[in-house]
Amino acid sequence: MAEVEAWLDVEESVYKTAIEAWVTGGYVGDKPPRGFRCNWDSVKRTWSEGNARVDILMVDGQAVGFLDGTDILEIRPDLRGEGYGRLLANFMVDVAHNEGRSVLEIQIAPSTAEPFWKRMGFTVVPDRRGGGGGIYAYRILRKIYSLSDGERVSFSIQFYSEHERYRENPTPFSRFSGMGERLPDGSVQLPERAFCFEPTYSQHEDYFVSIDLGGEAIHFDNVKYETSKANGIRIDAGYTHFIDRITPQSSPD
């Protein structure tokens, strides 16, 4: 931790000199980018309280970069361009996948890092900003499941915004359909996870889900409600609602 803080202090000092020159020079050119020293104290505090995960990349006994959950990724300035950022980014994706997340959402700052994150498989939403003001981007983490030789049954799962839900003919923002496997307990295993995600929408909105099984509508309700949970809707570590296995109730909703 102390080693990381030392090079963050150096980076912050360089930034302060650059920003002073930029202001004195009449704001000509792009504003100098700032590192994450301003966030470091809060990172240390939440880590020491056990409320955050901080991973430090060590190479030959030296700290060359760190990762604060999915919020901050930084490489020591003099070692950028050596592939360490890719290592940490891949590690972040692996951790998110192992946590069971359906989607990995990030904020890109400074904007000059956008090409890097695109190369790492993230999709940028130009007109959306994250809570911290950075450029919003995301990467889908697909979950594929192998089916055995059980009975096949058709399914269709649609997710709707709150506004669409009450229209006469609502239009879903995402739809998953195909053939699932009916299991001995009556549930239906999907070949791939279906998840409630629309990158231009805020997660603070209410979403609705409809489930059709074998050509019959069996459910249509808010994803947060117990009725949806009873039919198989779950929520992952990234607070995205999803369904891996439909658990139809004895009678349609």
Image: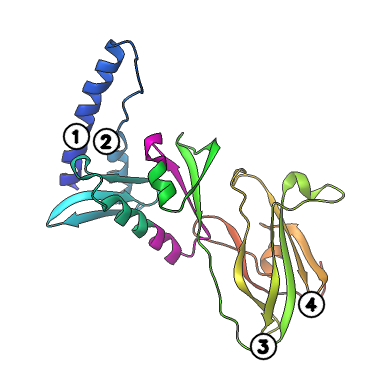
Q: Give the foreground label among 3 and 4.
A: 3
Please, what is the three-letter code of the amino acid marked with disc 1? Asp
| Labelled pair 3, 4 in contact (Cβ < 8 Å) | no
Q: Give the foreground label among 2 and 4.
A: 2
Q: Earlier in the sequence, mark 1 or mark 3?
A: 1
How busy is the neighbourhood of tag 3: few (under 14 within 10 Å), some, or many (20 plus)? Answer: few
Left or right: 42, with 175 as reference point = left
Please, what is the three-letter code of the amino acid marked with disc 3? Gly
| Labelled pair 1, 2 in contact (Cβ < 8 Å) | yes
Q: Say which residue label 2 marks.
A: 37
How busy is the neighbourhood of tag 4: few (under 14 within 10 Å), some, or many (20 plus)? Answer: few
Q: Say which residue label 3 marks.
A: 150
Q: Earlier in the sequence, mark 3 or mark 2?
A: 2
Q: Which residues are magenta?
A: 93-114
Picture residue at 36% right of the left edge, 23% below the top: 30
- Whole-Å distance between the Cαs marked 1 and 4? 62 Å
- Whole-Å distance between the Cαs marked 1 and 3? 60 Å
- Whole-Å distance between the Cαs marked 1 and 2? 6 Å
Q: Say which residue label 4 marks.
A: 250
The answer to which of 28 and 13 lies nearer the viewer is 28
The picture quadrant where one finds residue 8 is top left
- Whole-Å distance between the Cαs marked 2 and 4? 56 Å
Which type of secondary structure does the marked residue at label 2 adopt?
A: helix
Picture residue at 18% right of the left edge, 39% below the top: 7
Left or right: 88, with 193 as reference point = left
Left or right: 155, with 87 as reference point = right
Q: Position of residue 117 (x, y in %)?
A: 41, 47
Q: Earlier in the sequence, mark 1 or mark 4?
A: 1
